[in-house]
Image: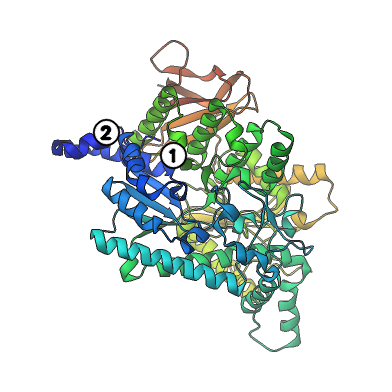
Amino acid sequence: MNESFERINATRQNKTASGLSSAKLKEKDRFAQAFNILVNYWEIKPSLYEAKLQELALRDVRVVSAFLPWAHVETDIYHSLKKFLRAAVAARLRVRLFVMPELGVNYPNAGVPKELLTNHANLAVNRLGQVIYSFAAPNIFSMPSFASTEVLKRFGNYLLKVGSVLGEVFEEVGDSSFCEIVVSNSLFNYYRSFGMPNADHGDYSAAHVMAFRDFLDREYKSNTSSAEAVQRDEEFKMQLYEGYNRHRFFTHIEKLLREKTDMVFSRKNSNCAIRHIDVFNPEASPEFSYQGLLTEVFDFQPSVGRLFDSIVRGGYRGETIFLGRSGVLRRLNDQERSFLILASVIYSGEVGVESEDLFKLSPNFQRKLRGLMNAIEERDYELQRPVTYVSASKFSMEERSFERLSKLVPDMVSVKADLSARSRALHERLIITDPRTIVRLVELVQALAVAQTGKIVALPLPMKGLSNYTVDAVAQLDKFRKGKDPLRIQLGVGYEVYDYQLGQVVFYDPTLFWSLAATEEDSHEAISMFLQSLIGLAEVKVPCSSSDPRVNVVHYVAKEDSARRLVFLINPTHNEIHTRLNFPNSVQVAPLATGNLGDSPQPIGGQSFELRVPALGVLPMQIFDIPSVEGGTA
């Protein structure tokens, strides 16, 4: 992918080219951030590294990325990683190194050493005691458990070896700024089994169960030795809460592994920039990988729509999309693959593609990408996701509530596992905590702190006969509510609204969300009414809507001027769609990049627009709010 629109080779030979404008440098940084050009260095002879990287540099690539297969690094007798880094320095390319195992990287067992997978004690198993398998290309293999002592020890040694190699190269070239370590979410997102409910997803191996019990004992440790306190703490660990606690435990151990990885690469000899992201490979997700296997066996055509839906969900979770060519994605034609790449950039902001794909992209598609990245950079546009849904993990949302919310504000929701400062978005307005949350003191304090900044935060109330609050959280809640006179409302679900400094706190009754007796129709209607009232309270408005539900509408807003927006109409079908785009107020609409709006190059004003969205296409537009004046609209 083009990560610089100026020839790098010419830039190096002509020093006057170093006086590029700040706008061009920004453009380069934006493109370098948006695209990970993956080089599978282990598939190339070390003697060809420099030629390969020079070729990429001549195609205007400035940053290359590489997954580091665990098994390959351990047995790297040819010192290929070291030679690859030296070649990158010689080609004056920056390097991103993905150090965590990721599925679908075209290396056997995703790089996990084969001998670790021969010991059943090292394997992840599901709730039924069955080994969890990955069906993602290039091969089917059993998944390792990161709770296993042997697996953790070997993984730590692998990280130390990578750090040692980096230290040697940095000392040799006298610089470490060209290299960045990327710490991703490893295999944790894939400890899920196709066909099993969310509550049963996860690793249930012996080592993992022991670690989970230790986690529960620490989380729900009694401050007193009374029989009532002991019994209450046991309630939080019982079967009713096991699914929630397990999902939170997955998030916890992932965080610990990331922190330990940070420590390895913060050593003096291997110190370099470290970035944390989540990586999502659509064809490796459990709901798709098994069907992908059947696609290979019976020679079916892959479903572009199913892959697109996975990308949309990955965008909700804020994940970087990885589109390799080792599985069913290689069966897609150029138009389908280009569409998925463009959709990944729009929904996620970052996409990984293998370097071989760079040479196969059409000039027309590259022009569209140039126009898109220039437009986003010009006003520093950001994806508009004003609603945040907080759950135990990014895969544990209460199904009915999240389904209704995503339909009420389509493509405007993000999913988070906590309310830490690092995870909060700049433009979020409404934060809804999952109704099946076990509220601890730390969650309650974080929520109140966020509300102080001017946001609307919704939390479940303590329930009768069901311990969904810890004792210290209940005490803090009582202290907060004491002496306050809230606004009490009953709209599908009863809730209380408290003004709290710049924002508001909503405490709602979660009983309906726990009830299995409520009919599907009644519960959905009540939940929709409640969520709609929260959306109205937070003044979250859908900027525009499409008359055809097959067309996805994605909104970007300029940081410095919210009256300027970008709207992308995305058609994931193989047929052209005629749709009407409706706005709540009059706006001006102008074409963007390769998007066309009629035959007029000038902005068009109105509230409703008839549009044609091409098959597997993206129609981008600039939207300008028409300012209101006294007596009407200007």
| Location of the C terminus (image quadrant) | top left
Q: Quadrant of residue 162?
A: bottom left
Q: Nearer the viewer, residue 522 or 206?
A: 206
Q: Which label belongs to residue 142?
A: none
Q: Eyeballing the image, is 276 above or below 631?
A: below
User: What amino acid is at disc 2?
Assistant: Arg
Residue that mark 1 sits on: 355
Q: Name the image colouring.
A: rainbow
Q: Eyeballing the image, is 123 above or below 544?
A: below
Comparing marks 1 and 2, which lies closer to the viewer? 1
SS under mark 2: loop
Q: Nearer the viewer, residue 257 or 252?
A: 257
Q: Quadrant of residue 192?
A: bottom right
Q: Quadrant of residue 266?
A: bottom left
How far apart in space, not on screen, are marks 1 and 2 (Cα)? Answer: 18 Å
In this rendering, the count of numbered labels is 2
Residue extending farthest left: 16
| Location of the N terminus (image quadrant) | top left
- Residue 294, given in percent of the width and then of the height, sits at 73, 40
User: What amino acid is at disc 1?
Assistant: Ser
Q: Residue at x 64, y 49 (%)?
A: 139
Q: Classify 10 Å Cα crowding around label 1: few (below 14), some (14-19), many (20 and above).
A: many
Q: Classify 10 Å Cα crowding around label 2: few (below 14), some (14-19), many (20 and above).
A: some
Label 1 or label 2, whichever comes before in sequence order: 2
Residue that mark 2 sits on: 7
Q: Is residue 560 among the parts visible in the rendering?
A: no
Q: Is residue 171 among the parts visible in the rendering?
A: yes
- Residue 432, given in percent of the width and then of the height, sits at 60, 53
SS under mark 1: helix
Residue 398 lies left or right of residue 624; in this view the side is: right
